[in-house]
Amino acid sequence: MQLSNEIRQERWTAIEEAGTATPPAFLAVLVFWITTMFVSFGLFTSRNRITVIALAIGALSIATAIFLIEEMSHPLGSFITISSTPMRKAFDMLGK
């Protein structure tokens, strides 16, 4: 039983250390590509209030999506946090 607990603990430690963060190079290429796409949209449209607002809303929605994806990589220690209380209660019940 002790060996099983040690293996489980080592497995969780390996998973936590591996991390699932987005590579910075991929993020840089993604931001560059999206910026280029929105600049090209802005170059080929007429300059009026509706198109500027539509492009701003589109850029804001994509920026928010990227921000939320990055936030989900670190749920317990970032700007948007998830309570660890249920997990601690579950571990306490498993320990009994």
Image: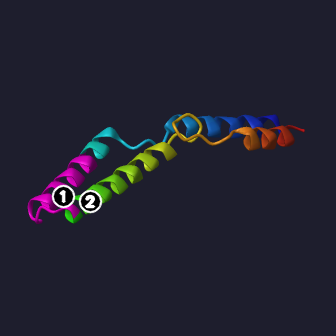
- The 10 Å Cα crowd at callout 2, few under 14, some 14 to 19, many 20 or more, is few
Q: Earlier in the sequence, mark 2 or mark 1?
A: 1
* Image point (26%, 59%), residue name: 53
Is residue 81 located in the magenta-colored stretch of the structure? no
Identify the amino acid type marked 1.
Answer: Met
Cα–Cα gap, marks 2 and 1: 16 Å
68 left or right of 2?
left
Q: Where are the magenta residues, as a range?
A: 29-49
Q: Is residue 43 left or right of residue 78?
A: left
Q: Is residue 89 above or below residue 45?
A: above
To which residue does mark 2 refer?
A: 53
Q: Give the percent coordinates (x, y) of residue 43.
A: 9, 59
Identify the residue position indicated by label 1 in the image.
Answer: 37
Q: Secondary structure at mark 2?
A: helix
Image quadrant in which you'd find residue 87: top right
* Element class at badge 1: helix
24 or 11: which is nearer to us? 24
The residue nearer to you, when weighing 63 against 12, is: 63
User: Depth check: 59 or 67 in front?
Assistant: 59
Q: Is residue 45 magenta?
A: yes
For the stretch drawn in magenta, what is the main secondary structure?
Answer: helix
Kind of residue sitting beneath label 2: Ile
Residue at x 90% of width, y 38% of height: 96
Q: Which image quarter is the N terminus in?
A: top right
Which residue is pictured at 79% across the width and 44% down the height?
90
Q: Residue at x 53, y 34 (%)?
A: 17
